[in-house]
């Protein structure tokens, strides 16, 4: 079997030893590891039945996809991020959150996208990227996620101990376990694709 690799250039993959010779400089691959660890510390462990296999660049919308049928998951960053380190890190932080509770290709709910955008904003501050969310649906999803986090910052970890998969959360579950209004619970559980269409 012959494989043709893309000849397109991409920053963030070549590394070199540190001056101290006790390790290597960060790449997007090692930053993926750091971000995933941070996400797990904040929101609970990832679903270990899925294996993250790497980072790719294509198109104009960051996303995850599932190559093959063996529960592998890949992160796709945009073409414009191939030679823009800040944009690549900003997008990577968002997509890392989807590694916690992969949907297997189903639509992610508003709560997952809201938390992903919040984590992305955190990366913006930590890595001094000087980037900001501009898409209205994501801004609104972060507002809804913050309403859930208000008063109990560790609520996501607590809820994920009961049901680890965001896409399996129901309004009934959130009303019962998070003690929030039915209206907020319904918005948080709505498929983001429907929410995005309505909020654009």
Image (spheres, rainbow, N blue to C red):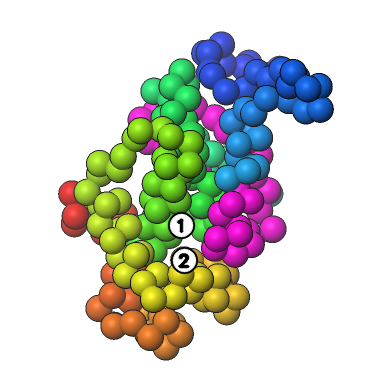
Determine the secondary structure under disc 2.
helix
Q: Is residue 127 above or below residue 147?
A: above
Q: Is residue 104 visible?
A: no
Q: In terms of image quadrants, where is residue 157?
A: bottom right
Rendered location of residue 44, percent (x, y):
59, 64
Residue 81 relative to residue 194: left or right = right
Return the residue found at the far bottom: 176
- Closer to us: mark 1 or mark 2? 2
Circle 1 Cα neighbour tier, 10 Å, few/some/many (<14 / 14–19 / ≥20): few
Q: In terms of image quadrants, where is residue 134?
A: top left
Determine the secondary structure under disc 1.
loop
Q: In terms of image quadrants, where is residue 42?
A: bottom right
Q: Is residue 128 above or below residue 24?
A: below
Instruction: Confirm whether the magenta stretch covers residue 49.
Output: yes
Label 1 close to label 2 by CB (< 8 Å) = yes
Q: Which residue is mark 1?
A: 106
Identify which residue, 19 or 38, lies in the foreground: 19
Q: How many marks?
A: 2
Q: Which residue is mark 2?
A: 167
Q: Is residue 84 visible?
A: yes
Instruction: Confirm whether the magenta stretch covers residue 148.
Output: no
Give whichever of discs 1 and 2 has the lower sequence position: 1
Q: Residue at 53%, 18% (x, y): give it.
A: 10
- The boundaries of the magenta stretch are 36-64
């Amino acid at each position: 079997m012959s494989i043709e690799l893309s000849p397109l250039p991409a920053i963030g993959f070549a590394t070199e030893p540190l001056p101290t010779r006790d390790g290597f400089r960060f790449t997007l691959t090692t930053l993926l590891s750091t971000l995933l660890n941070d996400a797990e510390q904040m929101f609970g462990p990832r679903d270990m039945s899925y294996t993250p296999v790497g980072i790719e660049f294509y198109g104009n919308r960051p996303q995850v996809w599932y190559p093959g049928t063996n529960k592998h998951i890949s992160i796709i960053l945009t073409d414009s991020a191939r030679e823009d380190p800040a944009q690549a890190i900003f997008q990577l932080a968002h997509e890392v959150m989807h590694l916690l509770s992969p949907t297997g290709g189903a639509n992610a709910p508003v709560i997952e996208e809201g938390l992903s955008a919040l984590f992305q904003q955190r990366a913006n501050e930590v890595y001094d990227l000087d980037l900001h969310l501009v898409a209205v649906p994501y801004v609104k999803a972060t507002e809804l996620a913050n309403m859930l986090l208000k008063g109990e910052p560790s609520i996501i970890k607590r809820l994920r101990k009961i049901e680890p998969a965001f896409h399996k959360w129901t309004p009934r579950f959130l009303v019962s376990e998070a003690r929030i209004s039915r209206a907020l619970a319904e918005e948080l559980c709505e498929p983001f694709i429907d929410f995005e269409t309505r909020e654009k």
